[in-house]
Image (cartoon, grey):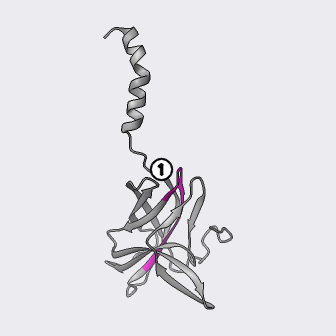
Amino acid sequence: MKPNTLRLLMPTLVALAAIATPVLAQVSVSDAWVRGTVASQRATGAFMNLQSASDAALVGAASPVAKVVEVHEMAHEGGVMKMRAIDRLPLPAGRKVELKPGGYHVMLMALTAPIKEGDVVPITLTVEAKDGKRSTVEVKATARALTAPATGQHGGMKH
């Protein structure tokens, strides 16, 4: 192909590549940690900060250290703090969403073994982009002591 022909076709090739490329949510994860457990404990929480480049939602999670992994929220209902699983956690474009004790978090249940301080816990997050396409984000969360403060490092931040 002649250089001039390639130069003329380049804008068309770039446009076609953009159309063929799926738009997946780009989610960054920071400060990921898991609360350590004691021998008989069957569940714990994972906490982290999530930020998406485009509107998306956290729609699931999995980990080899737990048979059941769910995204949970803590909410006041009738003056009582209750925890429940949620199907999706919105990740608004450009805004940090904090998963923290007493708020949104990833619940690791039916643990396969105790989690000791310093352990690295792999977690796979499933994120759904605005267009419905799903992608995964691999997280390595370091276990903190069972007595780690409930507010973590960012106690004053809100969603």
Q: Which residues are magenta?
A: 44-56
Q: Nearer the viewer, residue 7 or 149?
A: 7
Q: Position of residue 36 (x, y in %)?
A: 46, 76
Q: Position of residue 148 (x, y in %)?
A: 56, 76
In the rendered image of this protein, does residue 76 appear above or below residue 93?
Answer: below
13 in the magenta segment: no
In the rendered image of this protein, does residue 42 appear above or below residue 60?
Answer: below
Main SS of residues in magenta: strand
**Residue 114 picture quarter:** bottom left
Q: Nearer the viewer, residue 55 or 135?
A: 55
**Residue 14 picture quarter:** top left
Q: Position of residue 25 (x, y in %)?
A: 46, 51
| Count of residue discs | 1
At mark 1, the secondary structure is: loop
Quadrant showing the N terminus:
top left
What residue is shown at x 57% (from left), y 63% (from top)? 97
